[in-house]
Amino acid sequence: MISPVLALLVSFLCHCVIEGRNCPKPQELPFSTVVPLKWSYEPGEQILYSCKPGYVSRGGMRRFTCPLTGMWPINTLKCQPRICPFAGVLENGVVRYTTFEYPNTVNFTCNKGFHLNGTASVKCTEEGRWSHSLPICSPITCPPPSIPNFATLKLHGTSAKNISFYQDTAGFDCLPHYAMFGNDTITCTENGNWTELPECREVKCPFPTRPDNGFVNYPANTALYYKDKATYGCHETYALDGPEEVECGKFGTWSASPTCKASCKIPVKKATVLYKGEKVNIQDKLKNGILHGEIISFFCKNKEKKCSYTEDAQCLDGNLEIPSCFKEHSSWAFWKTDASDREPC
């Protein structure tokens, strides 16, 4: 028969063993929660693992009971993020993302010439759906181009169905007597509007002045306008310095103001010169001189080397300066060789 003291001791020891087998705080698993969560559990108590919002179980146990051993069973629960539908293609645009899993975000941008119709980013939600509808890239279009006052539309490069898309162009011509200020071609921009319109302004030029020793012809109108033309000419023995035809410019001035310049008499009785690439005798070919702006080349002697070289002389409004190196050959010194007959240096 067991003594009362021994029985009390055995009962105390058994109680201590049972009390010492409580289970500790359960293992933390990624993306999951435990209910109830405590630091200690008595044998027989149950816990329940659940995946956090946005995550789903991919196998493994969820409910556990604290055993008498005080050791939780091995937990194989795996919580993985929900996956949203594929969103990796955006026609005429670019999709930037890492994965389509919760809680990642996908960003969208459109290529040049297209604008984003919808949100620029979407997020994969807890339910495995995108936070917004996926956007599309729509072509940038411009309204029909305005036509400047006193202008006509000469060119309208539309893509299709008379709709203007990004980088389409429209060109203009001004009506007669009007000059264009600005670019005659406008372009549909990436902002959906046209570049700046040009302006057509009426332009008048003063009647051209008759040059001295010459004449000018122009339309017999009460006024002369942009792009009207006038022609100039000179009297005999005078040469035109400037273009024969001038035009009324967009700033109300003529493109040039030609004048008539006097021809030049050659103050030499007899000489051989170069004129327009040929050797000619002044006394035969150039008795009347040369016109303003023309050049003749005189032959000069190099006495040391016994050869010849040329120096140019140009007629400038009646003035012709003979090169200092030139010496007119005297017909009396028939035994001397003219510079034009010597070998070139």
Image (cartoon, rainbow, N blue to C red):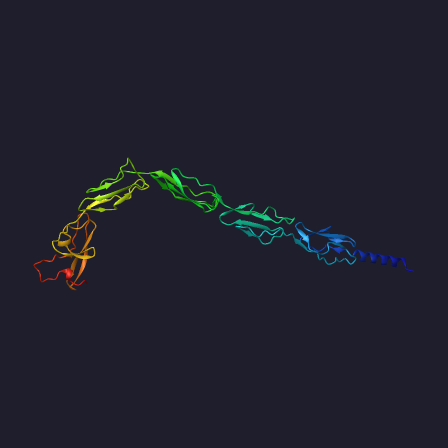
The residue depicted at 80 percent of the width and 58 percent of the height is 17
Task: Tell which of 282 and 71 is nearer to you.
Answer: 282
Residue 251 placement (x, y as % from top left): 32, 41
Which part of the image, by quadrant, shows the C terminus? bottom left
The residue depicted at 85 percent of the width and 57 percent of the height is 11
Residue at the extreme left: 332
Which part of the image, by quadrant, shows the N terminus? bottom right
Residue at the extreme right: 1
Total numbered labels: 0
Residue at the extreme bottom: 305
Question: In the figure, is residue 282 to the left or right of 121?
Answer: left
Task: Tell which of 173 and 34 is nearer to you.
Answer: 173
Place residue 29 in its image quadrant. Answer: bottom right
Q: Is residue 148 above or below residue 80?
A: above
Question: In the figure, is residue 257 to the left or right of 61?
Answer: left
Residue 232 placement (x, y as % from top left): 24, 43
Residue 116 placement (x, y as % from top left): 53, 46
Q: Is residue 251 above or below residue 308?
A: above
Task: Tell which of 336 and 228 is nearer to you.
Answer: 228
Residue at the extreme top: 222
Residue 134 placement (x, y as % from top left): 58, 47
Task: Tell which of 323 and 208 is nearer to you.
Answer: 208
